[in-house]
């Protein structure tokens, strides 16, 4: 984006000034130098610059600035959480916050802060996933037969319109959100039930900015018969769910892996002893991870050291439920993992507890969550300038 030219007297020679001698609000330095400088400025400050002039309002979302700013944004794999102010406000509003993973590892109680920077959350929407600062939200019709999505950038406070609706049955929609770097396209993928009697699932895709959902061709032979995980995990340009492949005695639990660039899928085997019990995939330390609960007797945490290689599954922790201070019927979810893999923090929302598991010291500690109306989610959230709608 080139800066408007200026006359010798400092006036805007592009004709946009209000009169002779009026100075332009555009900078005099080259755009590439401006981008280099602004790429290091926090989003909150950049959004204030938009109020200076039409030029600044446009320049803040220059594609080159957006890309470089995203590359330079600090990434600490923060915990994204919604905090409900029940009892404090009449509207029972929910607010989105974030907490540093490093702070959480050092002090689990730090997850609930009083920073005053909460962002109001859309009512009646559920978070599908987070990618490059964008949050994908979904809304299901009260009759459980339609679903919509929209995209939201909490840092810029900008959001898209709702997508076209997609027909589903029984409210079944297993969704995930990610970024196709090859085309710089953000996509939400859903495995939806279209025939409850036949238990028929279809795979559909919606691209940010499109006005439709597209069906992805599948075959019964290699497409899962059941999705065990409601929200998929984005990693390495792919979306991943725990699913069931096959039927009857030939059933097996696999990672259904959808490649966003080629829009094709494959299935990876999970650890051999993860067939029975509850299993859920996550992404920690740049690796695919699996939480597995065996008959409510033990919690196991696996990490796939080399993506897509079955032999690289590594058991990091295996904890008996005897050491947990909550009932066996409750399922803890992982929030963060230290870089060396020695410390894992779990959350049990039903009991308002955080559990710090230290593998090196063979130690388990429980911490009470001080706020009773909170929902914690581990994400790779980063504040960015990425637009939630397609630019023309």
Image (tube, rainbow, N blue to C red):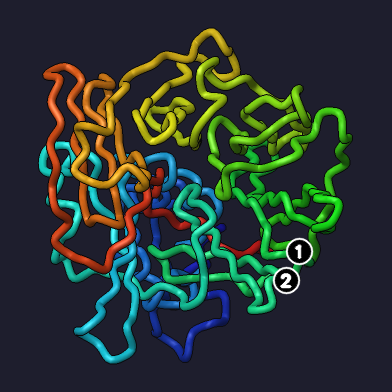
Look at 52% across and 48% down and name the residue there: 64
- Nearer to us in this view, 145 or 127: 145
Q: Position of residue 214 (x, y in %)?
A: 83, 54
Q: Position of residue 205 (x, y in %)?
A: 75, 51
- Nearer to us in this view, 283 or 33: 283
Neighbor class of circle 2 (other Cα within 10 Å; few <14, some 14-19, many 20+) is some
Look at 84% across and 56% down and name the residue there: 197
Could you tell me which quadrant the N terminus lies in?
Answer: bottom right
Residue 168 lies left or right of residue 141; in this view the side is right
In the picture of the structure, the residue carrying the numbered disc 2 is 146
Neighbor class of circle 1 (other Cα within 10 Å; few <14, some 14-19, many 20+) is many
Q: Quadrant of residue 258?
A: top right
Give residue 345's mark: none
Look at 37% across and 51% down and name the residue there: 377
Q: Are marks 1 and 2 in contact (CB under 8 Å)?
A: yes
Residue 192 is at least partly visible in this image: yes
In the picture of the structure, the residue carrying the numbered disc 1 is 168
Residue 9 is at least partly visible in this image: no
**Dot 1: what SS?**
loop
Relative vertical location of residue 351 with respect to residue 57 in this rendering, above or below: above
Relative vertical location of residue 278 with respect to residue 306 in this rendering, above or below: below
């Amino acid at each position: 984006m080139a800066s408007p030219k200026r006359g010798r007297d400092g006036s805007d020679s592009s004709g946009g000034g209000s009169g002779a001698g009026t100075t332009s609000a555009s900078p005099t330095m080259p755009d590439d130098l401006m981008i280099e400088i602004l790429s290091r400025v926090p989003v909150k400050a950049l959004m204030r610059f938009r109020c200076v002039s039409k030029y600044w309002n446009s320049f803040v979302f220059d594609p080159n600035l957006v890309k470089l700013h995203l590359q330079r944004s600090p990434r600490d794999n923060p915990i994204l959480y919604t905090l409900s102010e029940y009892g404090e406000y009449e509207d029972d509003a929910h607010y989105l916050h974030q907490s540093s993973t490093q702070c959480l590892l050092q002090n689990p109680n730090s997850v609930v802060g009083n920073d005053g920077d909460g962002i109001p959350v859309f009512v009646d929407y559920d978070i599908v996933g987070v990618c490059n600062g964008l949050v994908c939200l979904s809304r299901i019709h009260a009759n459980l037969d339609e679903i919509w999505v929209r995209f939201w950038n909490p840092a810029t406070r900008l959001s898209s319109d709702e997508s076209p609706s997609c027909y589903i049955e029984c409210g079944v929609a297993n969704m995930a959100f990610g970024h196709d770097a090859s085309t710089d396209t953000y996509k939400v993928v859903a495995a939806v039930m279209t025939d409850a009697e036949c238990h028929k699932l279809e795979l559909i895709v919606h691209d940010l900015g499109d006005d439709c959902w597209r069906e992805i061709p599948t075959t019964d032979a290699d497409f899962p018969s059941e999705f065990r995980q409601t929200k998929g995990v984005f990693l390495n340009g792919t979306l991943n769910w725990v699913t069931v492949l096959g039927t009857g005695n030939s059933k097996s639990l696999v990672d259904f892996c959808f490649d966003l660039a080629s829009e094709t899928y494959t299935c990876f085997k999970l650890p051999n002893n993860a067939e029975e019990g509850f299993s859920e995939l996550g992404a920690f330390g740049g690796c695919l991870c699996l939480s597995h609960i065996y008959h409510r007797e033990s919690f196991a945490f696996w990490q796939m050291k080399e993506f897509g290689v079955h032999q690289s599954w590594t058991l990091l922790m295996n904890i008996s439920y005897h050491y947990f201070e909550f009932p066996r019927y409750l399922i803890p979810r992982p929030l963060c993992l230290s870089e060396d893999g020695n410390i894992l923090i779990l959350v049990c929302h039903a009991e308002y507890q955080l559990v710090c598991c230290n593998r090196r010291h063979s130690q388990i500690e429980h911490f009470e969550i001080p706020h009773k109306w909170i929902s914690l989610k581990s994400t790779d959230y980063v504040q960015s300038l990425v637009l939630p709608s397609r630019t023309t």
